[in-house]
Image (cartoon, rainbow, N blue to C red):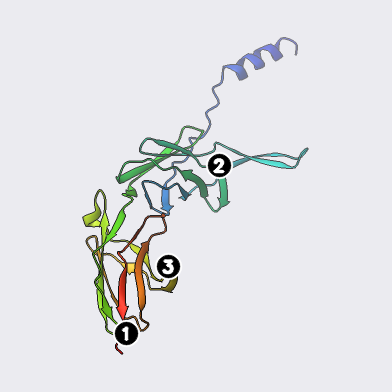
């Protein structure tokens, strides 16, 4: 028996144990799928695989093994927050160039997947408002707002339009919608006074019109 044991051990050590190959995974989606150049964006990447976990029962902690990494353009984004059902979250910081991007996700075990034409970075635009002349109380008139900056002629977003009277917010109007970089809003003001219009988007970009009068009919 003493002679047989070394032989058995040698045979076992000489055997190559092949582990089954890891299955490929896919990127199903990224949401949201766009951001402006000047803003950071929290994104959720949805994979068709779940992570492996290391559970420490001593301190009751759970740690993700093979944490995914998202690559968009020049940025590498750790996807360190797991939401369940294959959904991972991270932050894409500002600074990416305007354009459409393929995204790539890498796992710590060496696997990776790509999703082409999946993410868009849009230019952050400013605004300007065409000069507004004096108006007559109760009579409709139109204001014209222009997007400004790189790619402004293609801007199709929206912005909030606010009416000010004598320096105080008087009336929040419905959000203006741009087409080919231009937004036209039809207004009716029933109270005489001095007014101006402000346009503002959710990125903090804003512009104000010149001051104009609304003249009483009486």
- Above or below, comparing residue 128 to residue 42 in the picture: below
At x 45%, y 36%, the residue is: 111
Q: Which mark is residue 80?
A: 2
**SS at mark 3 in the image:** loop
Q: CA distance from mark 2 to mark 1?
A: 62 Å
**SS type, badge 2:** loop
Q: Is residue 47 visible?
A: no
**Quarter of the image where one finds residue 201:** bottom left
Quarter of the image containing the N terminus?
top right
In space, the residues marked 3 and 2 are separated at their CA atoms by 47 Å
Q: Earlier in the sequence, mark 2 or mark 1?
A: 2
Other-residue count near label 3 (Cα within 10 Å), few / some / many at <14 / 14–19 / ≥20: few
Please name the residue shown 57% across and 47% down the image: 82
Percent across and percent down for residue 134 are: 26, 75
Residue at 35%, 81% (x, y): give it.
192
Residue placed farthest to the bottom in the image? Answer: 218
Residue under numbered circle 1: 216
Task: Give the mark nearer the N terminus: 3 vs 2.
Answer: 2
Which of the two residues, 215 or 147, is positioned nearer the viewer here?
A: 215
Q: Is residue 200 left or right of residue 15?
A: left
The residue identified by callout 3 is 167
Q: Quadrant of residue 3?
A: top right
């Amino acid at each position: 028996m003493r002679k047989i044991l070394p032989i058995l051990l040698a045979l076992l050590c000489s055997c190559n144990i092949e582990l089954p190959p890891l299955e490929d995974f896919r990127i199903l989606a990224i949401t949201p799928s766009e951001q402006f150049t000047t803003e950071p964006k929290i994104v959720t990447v949805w994979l068709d695989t779940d992570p492996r976990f290391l559970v420490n029962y001593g301190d009751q902690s759970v740690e993700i093994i093979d944490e995914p990494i998202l690559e968009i353009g020049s940025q590498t984004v750790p996807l360190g927050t797991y939401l369940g059902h294959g959904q991972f979250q991270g932050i894409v910081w500002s600074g990416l160039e305007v354009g459409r991007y393929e995204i790539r996700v890498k796992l710590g075990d060496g696997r990776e997947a790509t999703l082409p034409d999946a993410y868009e970075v849009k230019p952050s635009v400013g605004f300007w408002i065409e000069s507004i002349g004096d108006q007559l109380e109760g009579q409709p008139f139109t204001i014209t707002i222009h997007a400004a900056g790189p790619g402004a002629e293609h801007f199709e977003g929206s912005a909030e339009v606010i009416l000010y009277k004598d320096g105080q917010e008087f009336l929040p109007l419905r959000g203006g919608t741009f087409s080919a970089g231009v937004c036209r809003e039809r207004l009716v003001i029933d109270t005489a006074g001095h007014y101006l219009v402000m346009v503002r988007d959710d990125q903090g970009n804003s512009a104000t019109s010149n001051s104009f009068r609304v003249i009483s009919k009486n």
